Amino acid sequence: MAAVPAVHGVVFDIGETLFDRTREWAGWAAWFGTTPHTFSAVFGAVVAAGGGVDDVVQRFRPDSTYAQLRPEVDAAGLLPPLTESDLYPGARAALQQLRDNGLVIGVAGNQPAAIGGQIRDLALPVDWVAVSAELGVRKPAPAFFAECAERCGVGTDQLLYVGDQLDQDVTASLAAGCQAGRVRTGPWGRLQHDRDVEARCRVVVATIAQLADALAADTEF
């Protein structure tokens, strides 16, 4: 059996991996004219059935997508900018620990350009931050992960992409030739599970705070 390549770069998804999106979802609920409780109930049911964020959006606005509606919701002033309080507990420390271990650390996800600026303003201990609006490509396209590897200066097989979603983050990064890590946080992390898919991950953790130690125990740097 061939040895698994050493990890030299780690790139993190944004929403529900590094950042808790609870405040954002409350803004969407307000924009749709419903309560956070109702929105959360619909959200949970859709995710538990295997759906994604566009499926949630279409329950309230048929034939629309998150990307199409995001500018309108932004313009309404209902989506608060990301702050330190939105980071999952232990996220900053985990990033620092991985960087101290000599890994190149990036942050990249499917987000509008404004989110990239907000993350950079937080001065996280990472080497680079990029969002799909800046990269010109979105997950699950292989080119997204190839760009992540290039920015880290490593081969795709030496890149670990860490996220919460099985399809957008895990299977997509594996299909692009990367290694995958999963954090079971947020709606997708808590409600969607597939043992076969998770068995292909380099590491699976319950919280981002556990990631650095779990990876150090499993990985030769």
Image: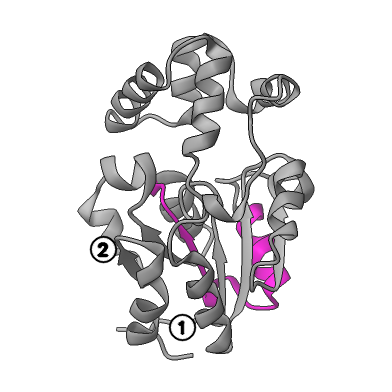
Query: Residue at left 77%, top 51%?
Result: 117
- Percent across and percent down for residue 104 are 63, 79
- Residue under numbered circle 2: 199
Q: Position of residue 89 (x, y in %)?
A: 43, 61
Residue found at the very far front of the displayed protein: 85
**To which quarter of the image does residue 211 belong?**
bottom left
- The amino acid sitting under disc 1 is Pro
Q: Residue at x 54, y 73 (%)?
A: 95
Q: Which residue is mark 1?
A: 5
The quarter of the displayed image where residue 42 is located: top left
Q: Is residue 8 above or below residue 68?
A: below
Residue 202 within the segment the image draws in magenta: no
The relative height of residue 57 versus residue 85 in the rendered view (above or below) is above
Measure how far apart labels 2 and 1 are at the Cα level: 17 Å
At label 2, which amino acid type do we have?
Ala
Spot occupied by residue 70 in the image (x, y as percentages of width and height): 66, 26
Left or right: 68, with 157 as reference point: right
Q: Is residue 192 visible?
A: no
Residue in view at x 30 percent, y 55 percent: 197
In the rendered structure, the answer to whether residue 136 lies left or right of residue 97 reads right
Q: Which residues are magenta?
A: 143-166
**In the structure shown, which secondary structural element does the residue marked by tag 1 occupy?**
loop
The correct choice, above or below, for 50 with respect to 203 in the image is above
Q: Is residue 4 visible?
A: yes
Residue in view at x 62 percent, y 44 percent: 110
